[in-house]
Every structure is written in C-alpha cells, then in structure tokens.
C-alpha cells in the first residue's frame, strides 16, 4: 500500500459532506472528490500543499457532493467528471436536490462523462472507476492503492439511502457485495459522510452487510 499518498478530508456544507483532496504528494497534480460546498476551505488545503487541481470527480450527482464544482473549476481550470448516468442530474435542480437545499444553484459547465472500468490518471496516481449504483443510478466508487472512495454507497455501520429519486436498494446491496467480495479486508473505505472505515470492520459491524 502506498502510504505516502496525500489525502486530505474536508467536511463541507450543512450536511457535512466529506470532500477529499488526493495527490501523490505536495506540489503535484491533485483530484478533488465531491466538492459539495465551501470552495474557500478546499482551496486553502490545495494551496497549502502547493497542488494543481486537474480533476474534479463527483461520486454521484446530489447537490451536497457537487455544489462547489463550478467555483472550483473556475478557479483551477480543472475538468469535472461524473458517471454518464448521473450527468443529467448535475444540471437538474430537482433530481440533484438543490431545489430543496439551495435554490440559487446553477451549473453550466461542461462535464466529462466517465464509465465503469476507466482509469483517471492524476499526477502519476491511477484512480479506477467502479460503477456502484443504488444510491443514484450513476454512483461510482474510486479505487486507489488499497483505498476506496465510495460516496454515499456505504458508511461506517450503515449504507446509503435509497428513498430519493433513482434510488434502488437491491442495486445498492449488489454494488456493496461487489466491493466486499473483490477487495481485501484491510481496504480503507472513505465515505461521503462520517468517519473512514475498512471492509473488514464493515463485514464485522455493519448490520446490512452481516445479513
């Protein structure tokens, strides 16, 4: 496992979404995963580490994960990436829930549509895209050297909600099974909200997975 990778977790917005700044090290190119809000907080971490943001990656299309995409793209020149099945959500205030959380949200940027199995290369790091639908149709997880960034697929002791537009509980559990079976127990899970965990810990403690 490459433990020299720089990963900074920033809690953003009213729903305390985990935004992740990921880079091979200080002074390199970086990806920002799920910049949901608080662009100033994100840029403080980016600039403090001398990073150049080249990729803005959304694990899914809900407002609390995409809210600062435009501001971050405007400041850094980075491209915005999202799974093709969630690409329309990013500009639809009803399906991305911004209508219910922040009526001012508007997004006119071009987005790069990604799909299962693709790799995004960020300053020497390779982030593998895994399509993990259930919370939304185009939800993704990102695998990087013994680590999984899973958005709202799974949390420490819980799983993502499926009662919102496009949610599907059986698809969610199928996506979780795929990850649980494919990756070793010491794989670190970085969720969209709450503390990091591991696959092994979730196998032991998560009531949805123990079933």
Image (tube, helix red, strand yellow):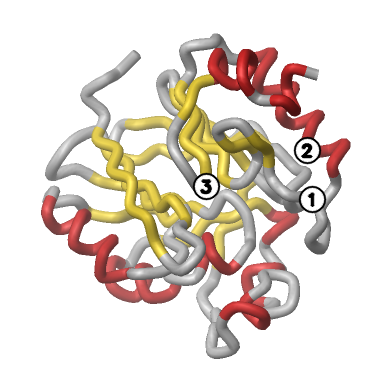
Mark drawn on residue 143? none
| Secondary structure at numbered mark 1 | loop
* Residue 99: percent from left, percent from top: 66, 82
* CB under 8 Å between discs 2 and 1: yes
Determine which residue is flagged by label 1.
162
Sequence-wise, the earlier of marks 2 and 3 is 2
| Secondary structure at numbered mark 3 | loop
* Residue 145: percent from left, percent from top: 41, 21
**Spatial distance from mark 2 to mark 1, Cα to Cα?**
8 Å
- Residue 187 falls left or right of residue 180: left
Q: Is residue 138 above or below residue 105?
A: above
Residue at 54% in and 17% down: 201
Q: Quadrant of residue 134?
A: top right
Determine which residue is flagged by label 3.
192
Q: Nearer the viewer, residue 54 or 94?
A: 94
Sequence-wise, the earlier of marks 2 and 1 is 1
Q: Is residue 30 above or below residue 96?
A: above
Determine which residue is flagged by label 2.
172
Q: Residues within 10 Å of mark 3 (few under 14, many from 20)?
A: many
* Residue 200: percent from left, percent from top: 55, 13
Residue at 59% in and 88% down: 103
Residue at 43% in and 50% down: 18
Residue 104: tell me if it is visible. yes
Q: Is residue 194 above or below residue 199?
A: below
- Residue 70 falls left or right of residue 43: right
**Spatial distance from mark 3 to mark 1, Cα to Cα?**
15 Å
């Amino acid at each position: 496992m490459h433990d020299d990778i720089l990963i900074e977790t920033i809690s953003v917005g009213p729903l305390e979404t985990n935004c992740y700044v990921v880079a091979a090290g200080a002074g390199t190119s970086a990806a920002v995963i799920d910049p949901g809000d608080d662009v100033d907080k994100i840029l403080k971490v980016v600039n403090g580490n001398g990073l150049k943001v080249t990729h803005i990656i959304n694990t899914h299309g809900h407002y609390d994960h995409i809210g600062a995409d435009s501001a971050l793209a405007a400041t850094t020149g980075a491209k915005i990436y999202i799974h093709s099945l969630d690409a329309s959500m990013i500009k639809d205030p009803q399906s991305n829930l911004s209508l219910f959380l922040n009526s001012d949200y508007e997004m006119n940027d071009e987005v790069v549509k990604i799909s299962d199995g693709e790799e995004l290369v960020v300053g020497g790091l390779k982030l593998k895209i895994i399509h993990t639908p259930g919370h939304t149709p185009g939800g993704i997880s990102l695998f990087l050297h013994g680590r999984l960034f899973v958005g709202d697929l799974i949390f420490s002791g819980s799983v993502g909600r499926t009662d919102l537009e496009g949610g599907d509980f059986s698809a969610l559990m199928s996506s979780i099974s795929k990850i649980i079976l494919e990756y070793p127990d010491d794989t670190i899970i970085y969720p969209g909200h709450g503390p990091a965990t591991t696959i092994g810990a979730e196998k032991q403690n998560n009531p949805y997975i123990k079933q």
